[in-house]
Image: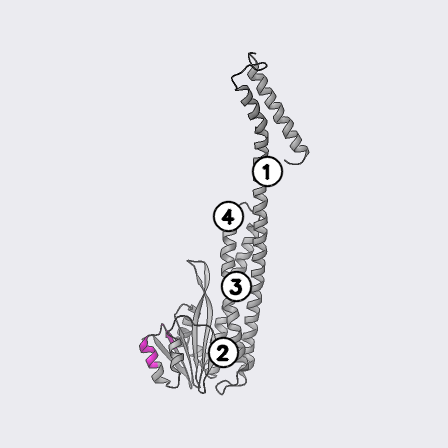
Amino acid sequence: MTTRIISHANTTWIDIIHPSAEDVAALHARYPGFHPLNLEDIVSPIERPKLDQDDDYLFLVMHFPRWDSRDELSRASEVDFFLARDAVVTVHDGALKLLVQAFERCQADENARADLLGQGADHALHALIDQLVDYIFPILNKVDRRVHAIEDALFASKARRVIQELALLRRDIISLRRIIRHQIPIVLQLETCEHPILHERMEEYFGDIADHLFKLRDIADENFDIINSFADTADTLASYRINEVMRILTVISVIMLPLTLISSIYGMNIDLPFADDPQAFIMAAGIMIVIVILMLAWFRRRHWL
């Protein structure tokens, strides 16, 4: 069993980590009004965010980002909420340390438990969602630092590493945008939801969470636009560096062409002018050097070097 329960006044918080069949059966026995399909959702693979309304409870599926250090990617971690008249139930996989620590803090501290549960189950639901949403800000702050680091390294010579960082960061931002955008409709529904379990005073509270999500969405969108601009700049710089290398190689090839021609002619087994002269090698080398100097001077004058 991975079910943990704490209570204060008339409100209970039930936290279930990695729900087993026994956990689901115990939850159903405690709250027989919970629909079997909602109970099935909490043990199924990751669900899309949604809000289901029943006469006696609300069922929410929400996603919040967690950092996967191995793949350097923010992945969606699902949290399922049941809101009953006197209880809030959270079901998750334990990956969100903030949620685990919040429960442990309420277990150990009576004041924390009173702050969370003392104003009713709907207030507890708001407080938990608000904490999880606010925790996205430090994640985006980390993204901002990575963006600034790439900006500083963009004009450095390590183009391959910068391009790799851009690709990883763009993938991470795309994942964050998708997670954040999918939560906005859920919170907006909570804000406008007319359900007997939700007091009218909660409309303003959930509206505040919606404002935070809009701000997070704007930050993520701005970072995405910046990264795309950096990617375009990196492509331009890479093309410029390739053109510079190709220009140098072309100049070298053009210079070598007449030298190769002269050496090929004098390598032929036929009678050539000055071929029997003891100074033939020096003369040929001198001609080659003069040609190189003249070509370099011409390239320099044309601003090709």
**Residue appearing at x 59%, y 33% in the figure:** 251
Q: Give amino acid for label 1.
A: Arg
Q: Are marks 3 and 4 in contact (CB under 8 Å)?
A: no
Residue for badge 1: 247
Q: Sequence order check: which comes first, mark 3 or mark 4?
A: 3
* Residue linked to disc 2: 126
Residue labelled with disc 4: 160
Q: Earlier in the sequence, mark 4 or mark 1?
A: 4
Circle number at residue 140: 3
Secondary element at tag 3: helix
Span colored in magenta:
15-26
Where residue 284 appears, as percent x and y from the top left, is 58, 19
Q: Give the SS element for disc 2.
A: helix
Is residue 189 shown to the viewer in this render? yes
- What whole-number distance in Å separates the C-alpha atoms at marks 4 and 1? 21 Å
Residue 138 in view of the camera: no
Dot 3 or dot 2: first in sequence order is 2
Which amino acid type corresponds to the residue marked 2 in the rendered image?
Answer: His
Front disc: 1 or 2 = 1
Which is nearer the N-term, disc 4 or disc 2?
2
- Graded by Cα atoms within 10 Å as few (under 14), some (14 to 19) or many (20 or more), the crowding at tag 1 reads some
Tell me which amino acid carries mark 3. Answer: Leu
- Tell me, yes or no, whether the highlighted magenta stretch contains residue 21: yes
Does the residue at mark 4 contact the one at mark 2 (Cβ under 8 Å)? no
Q: State the residue in front, 97 or 74.
A: 74
Q: CA distance from mark 1 to mark 2?
A: 63 Å
- Secondary structure at badge 4 equals helix
**Circle nearer the viewer, 1 or 3:** 1
* 141 lies left or right of 299: left
Badge 3 density bin: few <14, some 14–19, many ≥20, Cα 10 Å: some
